[in-house]
Amino acid sequence: MTLPRRDFSPPRVLHRVGTVLALLVLGQLAAASAVLLLAAPVQVLLAVVALLCAPAPALVAAATLRPRSPGGVTVADLLTLLRHLAAGALAASAVLALGGELPPRSWPLALLVGAALATDALDGPVARRTRTAGPVGARIDMEADAALVLVLSLLAAVVVGPWSLAIGLMRYAYVAASWVRLAFRRPLAFSQLRRVIGGFQGVALLTAVVPVVPAPVATAVIALALGLLIVSFGRDAIGQEREERRDQQQDPPLTRRR
């Protein structure tokens, strides 16, 4: 006997892309407001900048959720969007930390970062469990990770120096390079090494905000993470260039067109 398939759809109020994005922006503004209250009193100009930066990750969420419209947002998507919500609160925190209004190292920040990173371990299994895994969900997950790492690298820059921003900006620099080098648009085969190095970036940046981790130790860990990331991106770039040259040698010059 075939058992009926269970419905894993989120509640109706969280079913549409527009509704989810609106709730995400409201949540980010609420989280930023809570950060401002905890850091009060705060300079008015700095508070305004923090509130403006908090919803910025929602722009990334809107771009990646577009393929879901007009269909529904999955449960796994909602878990992924929690990272965007946390990124909004952390973006406001980074603005205040840069302005000297908030300690860059504290347990509340560390717990928030840890919770945001933990969602990365949940959305994948949930997507497979609910049979909603696919390229759209993978893209949403990847962009949420990139946005969170960028915000964390900005927060870490207050502790270890501006060079930590290279971690958050490297992926976007790679995308920008693909506009010039078509080879970088080639699909990448699965790599467990790339996955482990990517996951290590968030953990390394977490050490920058944990109060009990000495700043020199956090600096060394983040420097190691950056070195591994450079190796990972370099390895992928070299592989894509080799495949591009191989295809150019195999395809007839007169028939090969882009």
Image (spheres, helix red, strand yellow):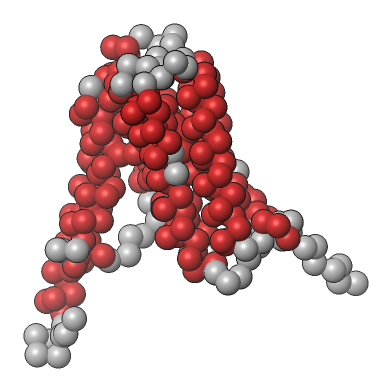
Q: Position of residue 44 (x, y in %)?
A: 38, 25
The reply to whether residue 140 is visible in this rendering is: yes
Instruction: Point out the image quarter for the C terminus.
Output: bottom left
Task: Determine the residue positioned at 31% across, 31% down.
Answer: 154
User: Picture quarter containing residue 231?
Assistant: top left
Q: Nearer the viewer, residue 144 or 35?
A: 35
From the viewer's perspective, is 12 left or right of 222? Answer: right
Q: Position of residue 180 (x, y in %)?
A: 14, 63
Q: How many marks?
A: 0
Vertical arrangement, residue 150 with respect to residue 10, above or below = above
Which residue is most to the right? 1
Q: Position of residue 216 (x, y in %)?
A: 28, 12
Task: Determine the residue positioned at 13% across, 76% down.
Answer: 248
Q: Nearer the viewer, residue 232 or 182?
A: 182
Instruction: Point out the image quarter for the N terminus.
Output: bottom right
User: Picture quarter containing residue 5?
Assistant: bottom right
